[in-house]
Image: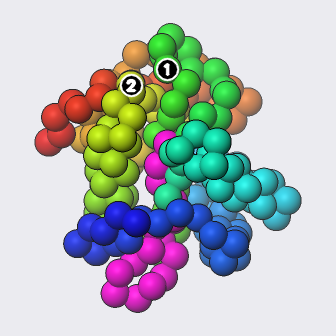
Amino acid sequence: MIETPRLFLRLPTHSDFQPIVEMFEEGPVSRHIGKLSRAEIWTRLLRDVGHWQLMQFGLFSIVERNTGDYVGKVGHAIFERQLGRADTNIEMSGTLRSEFHGRGYAREAAQAAQAWFESEHKQRTACLIALENFPSLRLADRLGFREIDRVSREKGDAVVLVRDPLQSED
């Protein structure tokens, strides 16, 4: 488990399923991801758990320290999708419930997850972010990711960004 001043980052569990379903039903969350069925959300949870078993990294569940509420998920994964000119297939990813947007939780959790990943794995990472997802693009910039390509997808165009291990952050 990783602790930050306001959050816990822990491995995903079965009890995260319902809060994840609720998160992906929220308009501000699904706008850039698309509408997901319960089955697709269940598959994502299984993928998140499986990454830890197979790769020794994955997405953490984010929990608010003061309340114990599920905030979202953040971490690294191999999604096997088109990343343009990126020379890595390891992506940093994060999704937060909309009630936690605008509180600085995304940056706090992402910085902690990135620091953990780089201390354990020291590999280049990428992000794939929808072109119109300005908050995520700003966060990626603050974390030291730099645009290297743009790709077209069914869901719309996206920016491919990369970050080298142990880059300094703002």
Image-quadrant location for residue 37: bottom right
Q: In this view, does 133 lie above or below 11?
A: above
What's the amino acid at mark 2? Arg
Q: Where is residue 78 in the image (x, y as percent from the top left)?
A: 60, 34
Per the rendered image, the range of residues in magenta is 61-76
Assess whether residue 167 is covered by the magenta stretch: no
Which residue is the site of mark 2? 124
- Labelled pair 1, 2 in contact (Cβ < 8 Å): yes
Mark 1 or mark 2, earlier in chain: 1
Q: Measure how far apart labels 1 and 2 are at the Cα level.
A: 6 Å
Colouring convention used in this rendered image of the protein: rainbow
Image-quadrant location for residue 146: top left
Q: Position of residue 95 (x, y in %)?
A: 52, 56
Assess whether residue 72 is covered by the magenta stretch: yes
Which residue is the site of mark 1? 88
Q: In this view, does 150 lie above or below 93?
A: above
What's the amino acid at mark 1? Thr
